[in-house]
Image: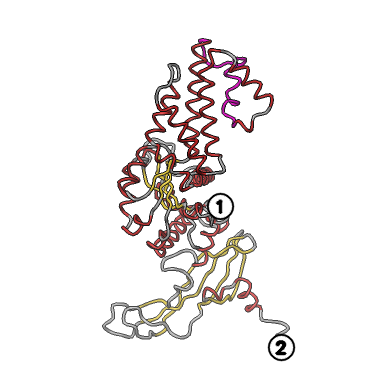
Amino acid sequence: MSQPTCPPAQIVADTIIRTVELGVRITDAALRGEVTVLWCDLLTDGPGTCPGCGLVGIYRDSVERRVSDVPVVGHPLQLRVRVPRYRCVHGGCAREIFAHDSSRLARRGASTTRRCAEYVLRRLAIDKVTVAAVARELGRSWDTVNNVAVTATEQLLLSAGPARLDGVRVVGVDEHKWAHVFGADGDGFVTVITDLTAVVAGQGRARLLDLVPGRSAAAMRTWLEARDQGFRDAVQVVAMDGFGGYKNAATDAVPDAVTVMDPFHVVALAGHKLDLCRQRIQQDTLGHRGRTGDPLYRARRTLRTRLALLTDKQRSRLETVFAADEHVAVEVTWWAYQQIIAAYAAADRRRGKAALTAVIDRIRSGLPAGLDELATLGRTLHRRRDDVLAYFEHRASNGPTEAINGRLEALRRNALGFRNLINYRIRSLLHCGALAL
């Protein structure tokens, strides 16, 4: 079939702007500063029917509906659509005058087109831009764009429904500071709940399931108990840090699930005890906090470095520190710290579990005097023994949850902070919830 050599300008414009997707046809255009304005007619297949009685109406006049559309060549676009109005012919109908259905163009009362809402979601969720940046692109206010994003995300969550939680077998939980102002909801903290199933299976990334105000056992327990029994029965593993409240909540709400204390937090706890021991010995031997030139203070970072990564210079520095008899407590605590790291790094799970079990047993009790920090670590690890050792069976780490925390920090930083927890929850789910756009 031959193609026209000179297609009408109207067809070209409708094709470029893709206004046919919105059910309108371009009739004119103009520039108003930075805004491109398009006048359009609504595409109809005949007179409209009354929404009250369903009868075909009689044409009365037309009104202009103004809505913002996706930007064109980097400039805001406004559509001014001519919408016919009709008079209802039914005498008993409560509607005397009604407008032609324009829901294909935009939702009732909306100031943006339907595809504009999709554009906002893609820019926020995929391109990670701020609401302010999208508002500049559309030539609308921050409040308008934020309301569009919140409404569209709520509709995504509503359409997904409970099915969004299907297949969740491994759950991660951690706290997150969302606000740094006095009087913020949940004292500025939320409990972050993530789906780690795909990560543990090696099939994908973690996704955010929800944010709950507060950082207590009640926050975690309330969220779990609000889910249906099928979801709770499907949860097999809950990964967490050392906070006992999350442990208690998981035990109460999903008693059949295995709780796993994250390796990062176990190592971090051991490292913290090593720091406390170093600081105590520093104070006892020199009578002041660490200063430049003090042996223990100079070695503070070297002490926290994994043994296999030490350079010759660092090894020499440690040998000098450990040569002093007054530093023996630091050496013993450092060695336990290194053994914990080595146990987690073992290629064979059984050997790693046996090695960590041996460390916990050795530092549990019966330690000589002067190893107070190591004794405290031993009691803590013994109390959470099952959770700590469960990692070697299930390999569920809370690291991906910490990564999502980092992404939420970036979201909050780019937005220059949030004042409304509802908006923050919606934006967070859009940012990290892997919602189907």
Query: For the residues marked 1 and 2, what is the alpha-carbon distance in whole angstroms?
Result: 45 Å
Disc 1 is placed on an element classified as loop
Measured as percent of width and height from the top left, residue 246 is found at 36, 42
Measured as percent of width and height from the top left, residue 90 is found at 30, 85
Q: From the viewer's perspective, is residue 302 above or below residue 116?
A: above
Disc 2 is placed on an element classified as loop
Q: Is residue 124 in view?
A: no
**Residue denoted by label 1:** 128
Report whether 367 appears left or right of 311.
Answer: left
Q: From the viewer's perspective, is residue 230 above or below residue 246?
A: below
Please report the residue visible at 30 percent of the width from the left and 46 percent of the height from the top.
Answer: 252
Kindly identify which numbered label has been placed on residue 206.
Answer: none
Q: Is residue 292 a member of the stretch shown in magenta?
A: yes
- When asked about the image quadrant of residue 376, the answer is top left
Residue type at numbered disc 1: Lys
Front one among 333 and 213: 333
